[in-house]
Amino acid sequence: MKGAEVEAKILKAEGVEFVSLFPDQELANAVAGEGIRTIMARQERVAINIADGYSRVLNGRKIGVCSMQPDAGIQNSFAGVAQAYADSSPILVLPEGTSRSKYRTFPIVDVYSSYRQATKWVETIWSVEQIPELMRRAFTHLRSGRLGPVLLDLPSDVAREELEETKFRYAPVKGWKMGPDPRDVEVVIRAVLAAKNPVILAGQGILYAEAWDELMEFAELLQTPVMTTMCGKSAFPEDHPLALGLATSYGTKMAGHFLRKADFLFAAGASLTDYFLSFPLPIPAGAKVVQLTNDEYDINKHVAVDYAVMGDAKLTLKALVEEAKQRGRAKKREDVVKEIGSVKREWLNEWTPKLDSREVPINPYRILWDLMHTVDRKNTIVTAEAGMSRNSLGPFWEVTVPRGYVGWGHTTTLGFSLGLAIGAKLATPEKLVINMMGDGGFGMVGMDFETSVREKLPILTIVSNNSSLSTIRLFPNAHKRYSLGRMSGKYAEVADALGGWSERVEKPDEIVPAVKRAVKSVQSGKSALLEIITKLETAVSRP
């Protein structure tokens, strides 16, 4: 059998359900021959984003796989792979390269050199006999330790090279996790029990470990408030009495209020990366910092930690809960829940004029507020685009279930959320998936709305059309200098032409009825797009 067929058989054995791609002839034919679904996007970056969204929503239990053509195809893919790397999303990237005789010869792109700084592991398959071994190593990296994208470059002549079937051997990879050092567990519990104002910062490590139940038990046992990073949003239900919400540059008042007076910060599954959308808030001088991570490179990176405990978040939190139970509960803190509620009410009252605004053009905060109170959030996944879509949605969308919100936290490419939503729908076909984006993001990837229609993966896309790139317009005179105020388009008509259901909304009272009609379309199997004409809103919630 050919090299591409060997790869396809291994993907089948590993339980891979689809390959998103911009066609690569050998592997595309081979995976189709194995009964694996192929999903063709309009561009390589979106194909990668689809695989990324799938892996994130399933917390790496199943792996999103993507493929692309050599040279220009792998060049166009870099931004999507780099984003998966920044957010530690486990995807398998399988480009078909040029033939071995042309490798590392100008102007052929050296895939290994180009991608070794944007993947957890990258390798070139130099012979068909290597495929089982390298695929085994790839899935080991994808399922063990800190997660991230893995790339295996298959030269075109190796894809066609023959392997005798008698030489083919492969067993699926389980993946491995490590538990914490018991001595570190004891130290952490002693420290948190001694604290007067402890706070937990939950990161995406909680989600990938599926440790949300253990996190809740730990927080409730010690009566400790919980805030999240951007990628960790949904690790703790935001309607819980101990929830502080999002702790980033665009976050909640509760997160800032409790962090500023904290004497103990427990970063659970969080890298403590100093980035404006990760965790930029200053930690009070003198506060003790404890970090739970499965990656030693996180420790003492941007924040000097007093204690660290390494291990899988689920296994580690279980051990911490048991240790806390043995040592007794923390001091009663009946005032904590009351204080959280008071600050939250004060914060929402400050923002009510925008959340319930009757302005025309529509205030974008009104969109998310009406949407949140219209859909069934427990059965909905919302994705957020870069810019104001993220800045407004992040703090105010109250997510109640794990992965009810899926976003990014370190770096992104404009338009990322559309592919993410398609991947989320692949992962959870029973859920309503809503993609919130601006006109700038839709301009980047809008043609891939047709991919969701063609592939019968119905999603709801809401385009906030304010005829500008909002975050750029925040700079004085930028709209004059760069003509950003002249962006235009009739996106509902585009969606209609691409085979979806669409509607244009111009008044606040039209939002809820339009959302209900759009949801009905999605439930019937047809992707929907709402183009909502909005004002340029510059106000953001700061913690």
Image (cartoon, rainbow, N blue to C red):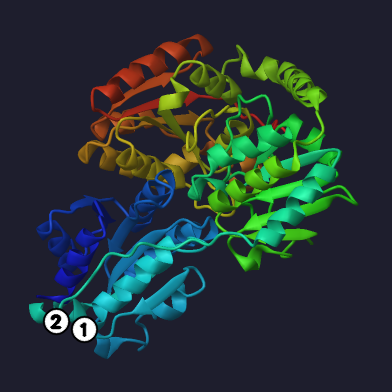
- Residue at image location 80% in from the left, 50% down from the top: 191
Disc 1 designates what residue? 129
- Counting residues from the N terminus, which is met first, the one under dot 2 or under dot 1? 1
Instruction: Measuring from the top left, give residue 244's x and y in whole percent.
Output: 70, 32
* Element type at mark 2: helix
Q: Nearer the viewer, residue 476 or 246?
A: 246
Q: CA distance from mark 2 to mark 1?
A: 8 Å
Q: Name the amino acid type tagged 1.
A: Glu
Asked which quadrant contains residue 352, the reply is top right
Asked which quadrant contains residue 362, the reply is top right
**Is 273 left, or right, of 91 in this rendering?**
right
* Element type at mark 1: helix
Residue 167's disc number = 2
Which quarter shows the N terminus?
Answer: bottom left
Q: Nearer the viewer, residue 126 or 335?
A: 335
Q: Residues within 10 Å of mark 2 (few under 14, many from 20)?
A: few
- Residue at image location 22% in from the left, 41% down from the top: 455
Residues at circles 2 and 1 in contact by the CB criterion of under 8 Å: yes
